[in-house]
Image (cartoon, helix red, strand yellow):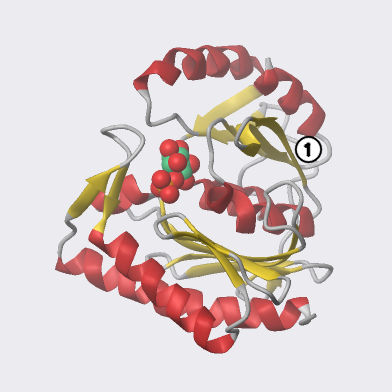
Amino acid sequence: MPQPADLESLAIDIAREAGELARRRRREGVSIAATKSAIADIVTEADREVENLIRERLSAARPGDGFLGEESGAEQGESGVTWVVDPIDGTVNYAYGIPSYAVSIAAVTGAPVVGEWRAEAGVVFNPVSGELFHAARGAGTWLDGERLAVSAEPAEAGAMLATGLGYDPATHEGDLARIARIMPMARDIRRIGAASLDLAFVAAGRIDGYYERGLQAWDHAAGALLVTEAGGRIGGLDDIDGFGRRLIVAAGPGLFDELFRAARD
Ligand code: LIP
């Protein structure tokens, strides 16, 4: 079985190349290729092109690995390693030209089932800011050579929180009620629009806690490792199609239980 650091290094190289492709395509103009779960849930031609590039590079480097990608689905491998990829997380930001999107690549071992797999390496790369967050299991979370740590506890003014809203308008009433219920513990709430960046910011201590409902495994597979390797906690509520689909919560140890209780109700 490969060393986590070797998987991390491969993911870093591929994320950089993929991120530069995404940024180049953004400059050239973005076209919507299709809508998915709802009219607001879009996929661009760049999403598909970037995922194809990532898949090709991984297959060339590690031909026996499995793959689970947002745009091209799942492929079983025989090596015991599966790559979980969101080629452009924050697709709507990307389509609007909002510079908060990221290439998210995770390498996991064990059953390729979210909630059962073990994350070995994770990379979240924002090609606009140039920030590349990365972690290998047991070796910490890093940004530009600096080891990251989650916030120990929120400031006296309250917690800096982040969340997201679902693509389906039918979920918005519940989302907004949850924000109203959580607001008393917050100094403010950010809606960054890319779960992988929300999680990276928790790992960096920029956000005290993050929660969101309805995420897919590729949205949080890499970011979850960033958080735990930075001393934070990740939790979720399952539903019929897997871990965390009902709720993902990430925070430092001083905030997690309170945020999880408030967000789960
Ligand atoms: C997005 C997430 C974001 C969430 C959006 C969407 P995508 O992923 O990163 O946190 O609020 O609804 O799920 O679709 O850009 O890969």
Does residue 102 appear to the left or right of 118 in the view shown? left
Work out which quarter of the rendered image holds the N terminus and state it: bottom right
Q: Nearer the viewer, residue 12 or 204?
A: 12
Does residue 222 appear to the left or right of 16 in the view shown? right
> Disc 1 residue type?
Glu
User: In which of the image's four quarters is ligand 1 placed?
Assistant: top left
Residue that numbered label 1 is attached to: 153
Work out which quarter of the rendered image holds the C terminus and state it: top right
Residue at 62%, 80% in the rendered image = 64
Residue at 83%, 36% in the rendered image = 254
Does residue 6 appear to the left or right of 198 in the view shown? right
Name the spot of residue 175 as percent of width and height, x first: 50, 19
Task: Specify whether tag 1 is near ligand 1 (CB below 8 Å).
Answer: no
- Please indicate, yes or no, whether residue 239 appears anywhere in the rendered image: yes
Query: What secondary structure is marked by label 1?
Result: loop
The correct choice, above or below, for 129 with respect to 117 in the image is: below
Q: Quadrant of the rendered structure where residue 2 is? A: bottom right
